[in-house]
């Protein structure tokens, strides 16, 4: 039987489709975030360094650990994410969060690692901001929306909802919800 030649353009297209499909992330529910996490930490970003690791660029982000809600508390933690900039080369991966020194976050850290060591890539990152009126620390979703309830995690947001009218959960309220969930995980 004669061999058929596959055009190079078709091979490149097939490879590209596989790469794109590999970055699709199904948003985890709150229960999945808690149960899949090796550690749940409140952190402050203190620095980052990008380097070549083989043919890939990775970024090592250093965090000062402010509190541990699940797992061992350490003073400092370094997590490695796929992507970053080395010299004039930049590798960006959809779904892999970028951090800036001074950022404060609640991180749901997975034991598996991979392109992002967070549960559900970006879904495992909850930025913490200080309410300018009350001084209370409030929690946002990875994309900057107020975290109104953990019941909505893993579901599509309501497009007609003007979220500026609602108060985001405080960091203490989120901690209590994590503690409640940890009590029901076998």
Image (cartoon, rainbow, N blue to C red):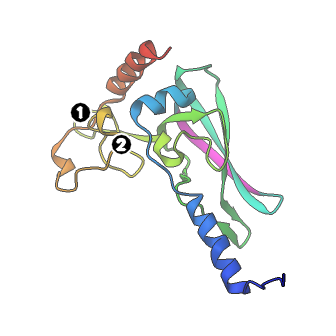
Mark 1 → mark 2, Cα distance in angstroms = 16 Å
Among the two numbered marks 1 and 2 on one chain, the one whose residue lies closer to the N terminus: 1
Q: Quadrant of residue 51?
A: bottom right
Q: Nearer the viewer, mark 1 or mark 2?
A: 2
For the residue carrying disc 1, how many other residues have a C-alpha within 10 Å: few (<14), some (14-19), or many (20+)? few
Count the marks: how many? 2
Judged left or right of residue 38, residue 125 is left
Q: Secondary structure at mark 2?
A: loop
Which residue is found at the position 29% from the left and 32% from the top? 169
Reading the image, the residue beneath label 2 is 140
Judged left or right of residue 97, residue 78 is right
Judged left or right of residue 159, residue 118 is right
Q: Quadrant of residue 20?
A: bottom right
* Depth check, front residue: 77 or 9: 9
* The magenta segment: 43-51
Reading the image, the residue beneath label 1 is 134
Up/down of 76 relative to 62, above or below: above
Q: Quadrant of residue 91?
A: bottom right
Confirm or deny contact between disc 1 and disc 2 (CB under 8 A): no
Dominant secondary structure of the magenta stretch? strand
- Expressed as whole percent of the image width and height from the top left, the position of residue 15 reads 67, 71
* Depth check, front residue: 142 or 182: 182
* Depth check, front residue: 111 or 175: 111
Which residue is found at the position 33% from the left and 45% from the top? 155
Up/down of 111 relative to 59, above or below: above
**Residue 113 colored in magenta in the image:** no
For the residue carrying disc 2, how many other residues have a C-alpha within 10 Å: few (<14), some (14-19), or many (20+)? many
């Amino acid at each position: 039987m004669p061999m058929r030649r596959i055009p190079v353009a078709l091979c490149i297209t097939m490879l590209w489709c596989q790469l794109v499909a590999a970055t699709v992330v199904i948003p985890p529910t709150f229960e999945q975030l808690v149960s899949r996490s090796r550690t749940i930490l409140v952190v402050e970003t203190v620095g980052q360094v990008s380097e070549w690791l083989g043919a890939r660029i990775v970024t090592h982000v250093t965090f000062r650990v402010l509190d541990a809600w699940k797992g061992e508390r350490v003073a400092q933690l370094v997590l490695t994410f796929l992507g970053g900039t080395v010299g004039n080369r930049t590798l960006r991966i959809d779904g892999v969060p970028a951090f800036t020194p001074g950022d404060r976050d609640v991180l749901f850290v997975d034991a598996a690692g991979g392109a992002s060591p967070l549960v559900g890539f970006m879904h495992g990152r909850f930025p913490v901001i200080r309410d300018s009126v009350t001084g209370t620390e409030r929690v946002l979703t990875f994309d900057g929306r107020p975290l109104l309830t953990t019941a909505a995690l893993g579901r599509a947001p309501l497009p007609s909802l003007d979220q500026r009218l609602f108060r985001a959960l405080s960091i203490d309220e989120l901690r209590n919800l994590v503690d409640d969930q940890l009590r029901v995980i076998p």
